[in-house]
Image (cartoon, grey):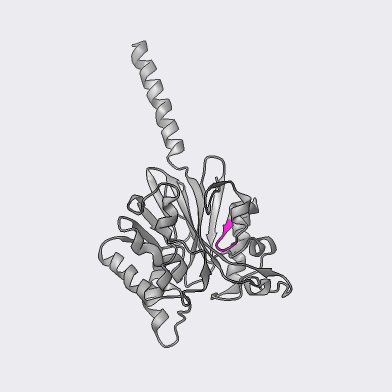
Amino acid sequence: MKNVLLLFILLFIQTIGYTQNSNEYEVYAIRFGTEGGRMPLSFAAAGASDKDSVQFCMMFWLLIGNGKHILVDAGHLRYNSVDSGLWKSYVRPDSALLRMGIKATEITDIIITHPHYDHIGGIVLFPSAQVWMQKDDYDYFVGAAWQKNGFNEGFNKEDVKNIVAKNLEGKLTLIKGDSIEIFPGIRTFIGSKHTWESQHLLVNTKTDKVILASDDCWFYYNVEHLLPITYYLFDPDAYVKQLKRMRVLQPNISLIIPGHDPLVFSKFPKVAEGIVKIR
């Protein structure tokens, strides 16, 4: 009887350990390109000085945990760029992943934060992945954006075709709403209005929570000074409101990861060329 009780206790402890770990992820930022020149900081943050400048870099994120390899955004294909010479040091997203020994077919899911070409274009590279996207963002992207008074700058018609194809294949899951846990330990938030209904994520790691802000915060400067971006934005006040909420959800600003800031790759330990581990 004692042996049976001991076995039950051991199994219970193992179950608790598994439950605690099943909602934790390793988080990596993967750089796949850099903009050719610098631009005034005032372009990236309304009200900032014209004398300071910034350089955009291109990145997406990898989450490993819960038996999954999840991408947050998928980068872009070179043909998707308005100017094929705009981005230096371009590496195709699936090739960038190989630096970690992960093949494109091993990606189980892709969470799209918003459908600008540099975030959604690469979904075609990961044929096995289930794609996740906010329903209102999807509806605008494939519909109203292309109507007479629609706003489609930063969108690519090939990407529209590709996301519709994913839907027809049963490879698209549409999310509706704010503060929704779409996987254990991964919660999505909306309201920034970068696109019609862009989203950002709060992710559990073993040591902390990480906010993957993507373009709901372009640079650390935006969240530090609570300043909205100046372009590709439906509602500046809503953008600032969400920056404030990010700082409540994660008071450590270093763990609010912006979508285009090269500082990400100097703040965290390098694990491969162009890849850092955030937590």
Residue 21 coordinates in the image, percent (x, y): 45, 37
Residue 15 coordinates in the image, percent (x, y): 40, 30
Q: In this rendering, is residue 278 above or below 153?
A: above
Which quarter of the image is occupied by the N terminus?
top left
- Give the residue furthest to the left: 169
- Give the residue furthest to the bottom: 148
Name which quarter of the figure residue 149 lies in: bottom left
Residue drawn at (69%, 64%) of the image: 225
Question: Is residue 181 in view?
Answer: no
Q: In this rendering, is residue 47 above or below 252?
A: below
Question: Is residue 73 in view?
Answer: yes
Asked if residue 170 lies in the magenta stretch, the reply is: no
Residue drawn at (44%, 47%) of the image: 100
Q: Nearer the viewer, residue 3 or 87?
A: 87
Residue drawn at (40%, 80%) of the image: 144
How many numbered marks does the figure carry? Answer: 0
Q: Nearer the viewer, residue 32 or 15?
A: 32
Asked if residue 260 lies in the magenta stretch, the reply is: yes
Which quarter of the image is occupied by the C terminus?
top right
- Give the residue furthest to the top: 2
Residue 117 coordinates in the image, percent (x, y): 44, 71
Residue 262 coordinates in the image, percent (x, y): 60, 60
Magenta residues span: 257-261
Residue drawn at (60%, 48%) of the image: 268
**Which secondary structure class fits the magenta region best?**
loop
Q: Nearer the viewer, residue 223 or 37?
A: 37
